[in-house]
Amino acid sequence: MKRFATITAAAVMGLLFVTGCGEKATEPYKDSGRGSTNSGKADLITFPDGFNNVATKCDHGNRVYVTYHADAPYGSITVVPNAKGC
């Protein structure tokens, strides 16, 4: 009986934790203001099959490179500060 009470209490605490965080998940950007939005096009560099593709874009004088491979769950990002041409 003590084990059942412990499991029930843990389940209730978990449920309270999840439901208590629900407002933040449904209202993004509520905690602070947003600056400018850079929604312009990015330059895309495509490579042959088996290699990652790269997208690059200027943002506030910095060159941002993002590499990805189709719908794979991995990628990486690099920022080059004060890049020429930005």
Image (spheres, rainbow, N blue to C red):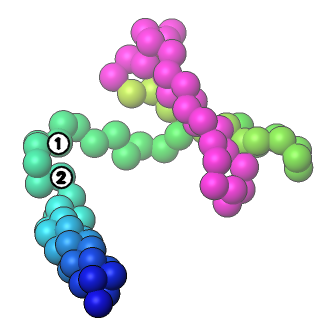
User: Which residue occupies the foreground of this view, 8 or 19?
Assistant: 8
Which quadrant would the C terminus be assigned to in this image?
top left
Q: Which residues are magenta?
A: 60-84
State yes or no: residue 80 in magenta: yes
State yes or no: residue 20 in magenta: no
Q: Is residue 27 visible?
A: yes
Q: Is residue 22 visible?
A: no
Tell me: residue 10, above or below residue 72. below
Q: Residue at x 48, y 44 (%)?
A: 41
Q: Position of residue 23 (x, y in %)?
A: 14, 68
**What label does residue 29 carry, if any?**
2
Residue wearing tag 1: 34
Q: Residues within 10 Å of mark 2 (few under 14, many from 20)?
A: few
So how many labels did they put on this image?
Answer: 2
Q: Position of residue 76 (x, y in %)?
A: 60, 36
Name the residue at the bottom extreme: 1
| Of marks 2 and 1, the one in the foreground | 2
| Callout 2 touching callout 1 (CB < 8 Å) | yes
User: Which residue occupies the foreground of this view, 14 or 73?
Assistant: 14
* Callout 2 amino acid: Tyr
* Callout 1 amino acid: Arg
Q: Residue at x 39, y 27 (%)?
A: 59
Q: Quadrant of residue 7?
A: bottom left
